[in-house]
Amino acid sequence: MLALLTVAVAAAVGGSAAAYNLAPTEGNAEFGSASHVVEFDEPDPLALGVDIPAARERFGTVDVISRRFGSVPGLFDPVELRGQDPDGPYGAPMLALVGGRYPTAAGEVAVTDAVAATFDVGIGGTFRLDGAAWTVVGTMENPSDFDDEFALTASADDAATPQAVTLLVDATDEEVESFRAPSGAATLTAARPIHEGVLAAGGVLAAGVVVLILVGLVAAAGFIVLAHRRLRQLGMLAAIGATQKHLRLVLLANGAVIGAIAAVVGTAFALGAWLAVATSLETVVGHRIARFDVPWWLIGAGLVLALVTATAAAWAPARAVARVAIVTALSGRPPQPQQAHRSAAVAGLLVIVGVTALALAGDPRAGWIAILLIVAGTTALIAGVLSVSPLAIRSLASLCATRASVSVRVALRDLARYRARSAAALAAISLALGVAAAVVISVTAALYTNAAEGNLSNMQLLVRVGEIPSQGDVAPIPERSPAEVDRLDAAITEMAARLTEASVTALDVAVAPAEEGFGGLPAVALTERVEPGEETFRILTFLYVATADILEHYDVELGTVPPQAEILTVETGELWFQPVEAEVVEGVERLTPGYSSLPGSFITPEALDRRGWEAGRAAWLVETSAPITDAQFAAARELAASTGVTIEMRHDQANLALLRSGATAAGGLVALGIMALTVGLIRSEAGADLRILTASGATSGNRRMITAATAGGLALLGALLGTGGAYLGLGTAHLGDVGALSPIPVLHLLVIAAGVPLVAVVGGWFLAGREPSSLARPID
């Protein structure tokens, strides 16, 4: 019982620490410790000499960050040269030294790991960009965002002719919005998300609620067994004059002592494990984790609540056992279990309440009301799903009443016979597996959204014609002659031959020959209005020519596109053609967004011919059968630089796939641990029945099968209830975007739904079967 409760407390404390530290830190990565940013885009250096002092006068303290971008031959992504004071008043969360020192003088620079790898430079080496050279004096990182790659100079003034200047300020919304640059320069402002800390706090609160329910369920299951095993002892105490109050105090004292020990030992174990694994989780979440930055208030509350929960969990069985008649107690027979129909009615009501609260909550970033609705809805939904446990056990026993072997029927009927402790055990197992399933499903949904999926797959390279500045996909496309295109095709084919079983897909854009382009090919672009009713448009993307190969990435067959559809695109809203005469795009078929750097807007070949447009080569997509290594990318970049093209590979992303696998493993292990200890308690309580079976001729195989069926039945029901509850809750929370849950993590759910029960059956078989030491009924 102590071990069982200790595991639950450890899971509660560890889960709270993880939830607190796994929250995103976008605010720190962009704003540092400031509340707002004011940005000058393409500023005039002379005007900055007036505007920055005016900002200091307006806001008091200002942290200045300058940026300019340099191109690297063969590389699509520009390299950022950032001028920032490491000791600035607000920028500390954006910089952390890894090795060496920060630059302190002109001509010195510190670089992040990706920049160092791109330029093959280390401390003491020379960093060259756009004809200038700096000495590398250190390596550093943005501890709030590992994907933020740049080179750092000594100060904001060291980045000559900056392309952007950002001011970090701590002011009110009104003060920032009313600021006007004396030079008249346009500014862009942004505020740190108001409820940035709400997600972290809400996550911890939700995790705390869930794990405390888990502790309560585990404690309830254990103390029900404990109360039944001590039934004859309590009957003897009652026979010699003990009152019901005395009998309750016996079990309550047990609960208090076991709860106190489990709280201390479980918390110590969880904190030790957290300190050991916290660093390895940093690559999963993409930011630094301070190992001692844990919610101590919640852990302290958890210690107290674990004691209170264990004591409270002992109250119900103590009260029930104290009311048992003395003769019945001395016989050792537990009271008859209650019927399950009540729990089904209660479960239905709780599920309705939970679903309603989750549906009303909406976006958790909206504020504390949404967070509290989510917590209340989650709690009610969990309680509702778990209230089905007695009915589920009874249904499984009835289903196998005539179709299973004698040993399996004995095990399942035993679970149904003692539904009080079996249902509590099943509820604890369901909750552990449900949490794991919820994390797996949520992470899978995030992996398939555009933001989490990233720019490209790790088995893709996107090669573009010519050098492209920082605007990216909407930058001019250089015009190439047919002979030059043939030469580039051959070079890309050679590049693919150096990779693992690579294929090449040529990507063309629609070209309007009669129009003037944007400094290159007159490629047709999709645009949107800057402001409703105005004739000013913002370019979104070029219009690529649809082919069967590229549409496979959107699960669309070119032959199935409706004849009336001209354009297939991931863009939303009203779209316009450019640079042709302003025309609203008609005949649009929407595509599900995929990787952000892949072409996402296409014109059908028929529409291309109908409009009299032509196809011009813009890029190539290279796909391999294995992840592209850094060495392969470096070789490809060298070839791209010599050929005059640029390539792009997958940017580093938070390793959500690893988080998904870790959640599956952790949830399965916690569930198996709880199940092993719970089954041990359940089977030990049935020791008298086991002795009777052995005396009647039951073999070791029969005894093993009984334990294996007990473990497997609980694990199977727990997996089904947990996974079903997870999908019910997440489906309700995603009512506005149910499609986000359409990618089903089949493998991970199979591990939960089939792997965990299989391990439980095998473990129960091998850990049972020992013949009872005495076939006689022992005297308590």
Image (tube, grey):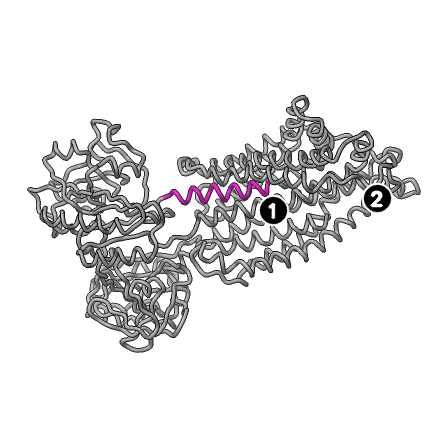
Disc 1 designates what residue?
Answer: 670
The residues tagged by marks 2 and 1 sit, at their Cα atoms, a distance apart of: 33 Å
For the record, the magenta segment spans 431-449
Q: Specify the quadrant of the image occupied by residue 130.
A: bottom left
Instruction: List x then y, in percent, for residue 650.
Output: 33, 52
**Most foreground residue, 493 or 514:** 493
Residue 154 in view, yes or no: no
Q: For the residue marked with disc 2, what is the amino acid?
A: Leu
Classify residue 479 as left or right of residue 160.
Answer: left
Quarter of the image that includes the C terminus: top right
Give the secondary structure at mark 2: helix
Of mark 2 and mark 1, the one earlier in the sequence is: 2
Q: Which mark is drawn over residue 765?
A: none
| Label pair 2/1, CB-CB below 8 angstroms | no
Where is residue 62 drawn, in percent x and y?
34, 68
Considering depth in this image, is 634 or 557 the residue closer to the camera? 634
The picture quadrant where one finds residue 25 is: bottom left
Q: Is residue 182 above or below residue 414?
A: below
Relative to 673, say whether 721 is above or below: above
Image side of residue 302 versus residue 377, left or right: right
Check disc 2 and report the residue beneath it.
Answer: 247
Can you say whether 585 is above or below 257 in the image? above
Does 438 appear in magenta? Answer: yes
**Name of the residue lying farthest toward the bottom:** 105
Q: Decide if residue 526 is in sight here.
A: yes
Q: Nearer the viewer, mark 2 or mark 1?
A: 1
Amino acid type at circle 1 is Val
Q: Which secondary structure is most common in the magenta stretch?
A: helix
Q: Residues within 10 Å of mark 1 (few under 14, many from 20)?
A: some
Q: In the image, residue 496 lies at what x, y percent?
A: 26, 49
